[in-house]
Amino acid sequence: MTDIPEMRKLLELAARVSDQAEVFHSRDDAGSLSMRNGKVTEMSATIQSGYALRMIRDGMIGTAYTKNLLYPGEMVDNALASMKGKVQAGFSFPGPADIPEPSGEEGSLSSMGFHDLHSRSIRVLDHLSGKVKDGQVDVAAGRGVAETRIMNTSGLDVRSRRPAMYIFASLLFPNTETGVRKLYHSSTAGDFPLQDLDGLVDIYRAGLPEVDIPSGRMKVMFTPDTMYTLLWRLSAAASGRSFHNRISPLQDKRGRKVLSKKFTLYGDPTDPEEVNRRFFDDEGVPTGEHTVFKDGVFRNLVLNLDYADKLGEEPSGTGYRGGMWGGETISMQPSPSLNCSRIAPGDSSMKDMIAGMDRGVMILGVLGAHSGNILNGDFSVGLNPGYYVEGGEIRGRVKDGMVAGNVYQVLKNISAVEDRLHETPNGGRYPAIVLDDVSVAAK
């Protein structure tokens, strides 16, 4: 990332009329294409850039943002005007830290264009050709570079550059838009592993028969792509915002065992295997491994600068701009968020996990993850798709069904955790988990 004189000018202007100031800059350069049944249906190339300003004066915070930093003085005026809202800020912006500079090494990703994305997609399609009868094959591929830079009046000046590419293969069941999917995600140019595509075909074929299932309580497997249904609820409860407002069901349970000992949840943006690796959050606080649940014990809150100050705790390097539903990152304020999250793997293979299910459901996709009282941990989701397992074998795809429960109850009864982690579209890496005695409703 090259130097941006405009950022320094904006910081200098803000420093003259405030006690503290911070300038945040992000830039995303991305290209993508989508293919359906061998034909390109969409191509896009985007460059999104923006600047955000935070100023603190007399204990009050003011904010402003822009897509194009043409008038820095006007941006300072807007931040000052926003202080009329009397939003208090007791925290201070962090000073310099020992944070690695981006290497600038991107390999062949830096020159990857639409031709490269198309050829890698065709390779996926060629491998799947003839293996998905009557169904539909969709492939999406993309590459991009995300850049972040933060400067403040405490002397902080940090930057990151995160190249990445992805290929997303979807196999849709005949005459439906429901199917099974697999993501390949990498920080260097690569091809979708063929063994993963073969595994996707196997799971697709297992779901071709449609079956009716009985309602009742049974084993339920949440596969990696559906894990966000449960983690969304845990993250809301562990957020510093919920603790400050005293509305979290975990309010007085730090240090206590609240889930199965087989469950460990943490985040680590510095992990060398992390595609979106970074060494500071969106407030310039150094990142590292941050454990929320360890062997079922609730250990730590997820905090940004603001809620760390309000709760009298240290910031945890988990303050990020953005949200579950996307949107313009530059327009959002940093909030507590567990980035690059992980569920620790267990010791069971997927094959053994299925074999150990006498009667149950595998959830490969969900509808309605937002439904229910999220903070309380309640969920009620449709299967999209769900597979029925009986006698340790997959019998077919469930015609219509729902799974409901409370995250704090179902995660107390974990019978197996997969021994490997999978990249997911939501940015985390998780294993599959089998839960005992969960309510399943069939139509």
Image (tube, grey):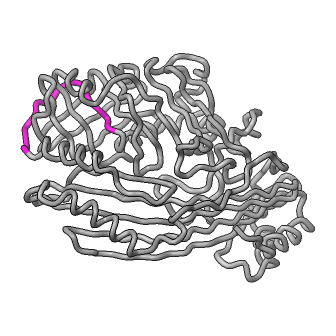
What residue is at 20 percent from the left and 24 percent from the top? 355
How far across and down, in percent of the image, does residue 402 sit? 22, 39
Most foreground residue, 268 or 216: 268
Please tell me in which quadrant of the rendered image residue 225 appears. top left
User: Taking 52 as reference, is 409 above or below it?
Assistant: above
Q: Which quarter shows the C terminus?
A: top left
Q: Is residue 384 visible?
A: no
Q: Report the side of 145 relative to 186 (left or right).
A: right
Most foreground residue, 37 or 373: 37
Most foreground residue, 329 or 186: 186
Q: Which residues are magenta?
A: 209-223
User: Taking 109 as reference, is 440 above or below it?
Assistant: above
- Magenta stretch holds residue 221: yes
Q: Report the side of 396 relative to 110 (left or right).
A: left
Most foreground residue, 167 or 85: 167
Q: Is residue 386 visible?
A: yes
User: Taking 29 as reference, is 249 above or below it?
Assistant: above
Q: Report the side of 428 relative to 268 (left or right).
A: left
What residue is at 58 percent from the left and 41 percent from the top? 271
What residue is at 42 percent from the left and 57 percent from the top? 190
